[in-house]
Image (cartoon, rainbow, N blue to C red):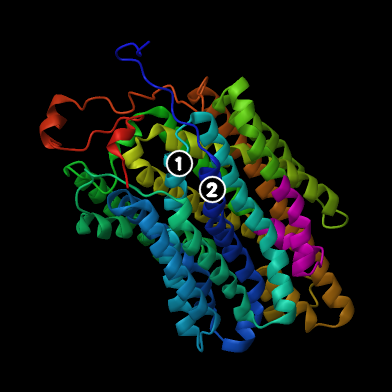
């Protein structure tokens, strides 16, 4: 019997080729997570070899994130226009080449340049991987599981980074950590043409160069301002950079409203699942970025663990996050994505509260327990919120949607390091009590931070140095406690927002599906004549080649 007129055929199920393709897409995700964590371990080694100044060290660390955050939107939209697999392979080639250049950089300046190129190339990888998943897995249930695997691979890379990096640095030079990317990218380039299909929007139009410049002008100053705020506090440069980014961002938004083929289709923000999911993702990454900073510091500088030992103690939290992400899609079928995310955030809030109880002496078990609960509670967000974002967008816009998801996460991490890092530092300065016998110059250095206190204590008599260390470690732990309380409050508030805004929302098929973009009002219809239609579920608009 022929199908009833107007009936919609069920989406096709993915087969073995698609699941093998997912394994290929997990490779760059694992690599980028590794890349961000191993550099912290390699920094002392490369500092000894290249002798960078303090400012140059900051640029080595930060330029990668700056470039990736700045180009995510552009690369996501470019993939929609010219082909997502093509952008992925171009990015993989560039990452491999830049990794070799970084590994053998003869000077600090060259290392900064290669790190910038790595960030630019990485911006082409992340949106392409996530948007290709949306096209390879049209069935909502399979897509949810695939995105859960994708999110878990990032956590796996985070967990493996300190361990692998520590082993490499034990036997090889600092540049070896960058060479990790070469075999991974070679494997991707060999397998991608056979296992990954190509998708692009045939009606995407040309990329607007002015919008690209404006997007960079909006994002880069904001990220820079947040990082400078974390480093120096409210110096004139921080608010000036933030203000410049917001002003340019306003110009960017206004321009997008006038273009038939905008770099970022603002109509995606008209439906709740997309907008709320981005906000929840950013707030969650804010707490994770700020708490991760203090927890790694506590493990190494308060507990005195080596980088490898600290990395091993971080593995349980990563495994908990992977377990939560993998089980979240099944739970969302029984409940809803909003309920699962809100429930997980409640568990995370309890974990962060445990961090508020950690003491400098014997606090390791409580710290690990709290961080495991926090990561377990936030694990579903990586799977379900990403799925909500991708499912809400039409197929031809999934690259742009994926880029917005990644940008939201990057901004959240930067905001967490800036705001929570400044909070912890302020508590440290308030709580530390330096013995009166310590010379004024050394006392001032000890008040600057735990790192400075450790260096200062080495130059003091043993008994006095021990007193400074005890006071500094207690003060740092007080900062960690304050960060834990703040994270718990922020996560609890996010849980309430999620429960109210995503009530009954299914990550596999959002309630707005099929009507994600209402017809624009009359006054906007003329302004946007000829704009690409944005309606989820219309896979015919995305051409498969």
Q: Is residue 143 left or right of residue 1?
A: right
Q: Residue at x 52, y 45 (%)?
A: 17
Tell me whether circle 1 and circle 2 mark residues in contact (CB < 8 Å). yes
- Disc 1 target residue: 136
Q: CA distance from mark 1 to mark 2?
A: 9 Å
- Mark 2 nearby-residue class (10 Å; few <14, some 14–19, many ≥20): many
Q: Which mark is residue 97?
A: none
Residue 302 is inside the magenta segment: yes
Front-lying residue, 437 or 214: 214
- Mark 1 nearby-residue class (10 Å; few <14, some 14–19, many ≥20): many
Judge whether residue 304 can be spotted in this image. Answer: yes
Q: Position of residue 247 (x, y in %)?
A: 28, 52
Whether residue 276 is situated above or below residue 415 in the rendered picture? above
Q: Which secondary structure lies at badge 1?
A: helix
Front-lying residue, 499 or 21: 21
Judge whether residue 236 can be spotted in this image. Answer: no
Q: Earlier in the sequence, mark 1 or mark 2?
A: 2
Q: Quadrant of residue 494?
A: top right
Q: Residue at x 69, y 55 (%)?
A: 479
Q: Position of residue 326 (x, y in %)?
A: 65, 38
- Disc 2 target residue: 22
Q: Which secondary structure lies at badge 2?
A: helix
Front-lying residue, 475 or 485: 485
Whether residue 502 is situated above or below residue 300 in the rendered picture? above
- Residue range highlighted in magenta: 293-319
Q: Is residue 362 left or right of residue 349?
A: right
Whether residue 295 is situated above or below residue 470 in the rendered picture? above
């Amino acid at each position: 019997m022929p199908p009833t007129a107007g009936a919609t055929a069920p989406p096709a199920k993915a087969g073995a080729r698609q699941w093998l393709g997912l394994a290929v897409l997990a490779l760059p995700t694992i690599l980028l997570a590794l890349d961000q964590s191993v550099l912290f371990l390699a920094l002392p080694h490369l500092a000894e070899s290249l002798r960078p100044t303090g400012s140059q060290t900051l640029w080595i660390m930060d330029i990668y994130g700056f470039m990736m955050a700045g180009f995510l939107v552009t690369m996501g939209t470019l993939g929609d226009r010219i082909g997502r697999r093509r952008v992925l392979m171009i990015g993989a080639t560039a990452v491999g080449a830049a990794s070799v250049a970084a590994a053998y950089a003869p000077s600090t300046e060259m290392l900064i340049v290669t790190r910038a190129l790595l960030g630019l190339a990485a911006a082409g990888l992340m949106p392409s991987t996530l948007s290709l998943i949306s096209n390879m897995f049209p069935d909502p249930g399979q897509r949810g599981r695939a995105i859960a695997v994708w999110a878990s691979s990032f956590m796996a890379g985070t967990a493996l980074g300190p361990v692998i990096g520590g082993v490499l640095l034990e036997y090889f030079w600092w540049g070896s950590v960058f060479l990790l990317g070469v075999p991974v990218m070679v494997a991707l380039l060999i397998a991608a043409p056979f296992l990954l299909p190509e998708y692009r929007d045939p009606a995407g139009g040309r990329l607007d160069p002015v919008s690209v410049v404006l997007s960079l002008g909006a994002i880069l100053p904001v990220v820079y301002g947040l990082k400078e705020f974390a480093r120096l506090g409210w110096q004139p440069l921080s608010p000036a950079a933030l203000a410049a980014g917001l002003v340019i961002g306003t110009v960017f938004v206004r321009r997008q409203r006038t273009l038939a083929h905008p770099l970022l289709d603002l109509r995606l923000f008209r439906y709740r699942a997309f907008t709320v999911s981005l906000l929840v993702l950013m707030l969650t990454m804010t707490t994770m970025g700020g708490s991760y900073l203090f927890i790694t510091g506590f493990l190494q500088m308060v507990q005195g663990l080596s980088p490898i030992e600290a990395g091993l103690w971080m593995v349980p939290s990563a495994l908990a996050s992977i377990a939560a992400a993998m089980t979240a899609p099944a739970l969302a079928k029984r409940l809803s994505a909003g309920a699962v995310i809100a429930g997980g955030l409640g568990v995370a809030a309890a974990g962060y509260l445990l961090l508020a109880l950690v003491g400098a002496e014997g606090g390791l078990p409580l710290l690990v327990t709290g961080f495991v609960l926090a990561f377990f509670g936030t694990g579903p967000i990586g799977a379900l919120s990403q799925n909500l974002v991708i499912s809400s967008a039409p197929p031809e816009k999934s690259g742009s949607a994926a880029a917005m998801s990644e940008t939201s996460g990057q901004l959240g991490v930067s905001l967490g390091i800036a705001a929570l890092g400044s909070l912890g530092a302020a508590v440290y300065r308030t709580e530390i009590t330096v013995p009166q016998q310590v010379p004024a110059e050394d006392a001032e250095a000890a008040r600057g931070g735990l790192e400075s206190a450790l260096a200062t204590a080495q130059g003091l008599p043993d008994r006095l140095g021990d007193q400074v260390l005890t006071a500094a470690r207690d003060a740092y732990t007080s900062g960690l406690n304050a960060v834990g309380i703040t994270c718990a409050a922020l996560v609890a508030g996010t849980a309430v927002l999620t429960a109210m805004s995503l009530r009954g929302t299914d990550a596999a098929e959002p309630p707005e599906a099929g009507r994600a973009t209402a017809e624009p009002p009359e006054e906007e219809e003329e302004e946007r004549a000829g704009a690409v239609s944005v309606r989820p579920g219309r896979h015919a608009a995305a051409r498969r080649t």
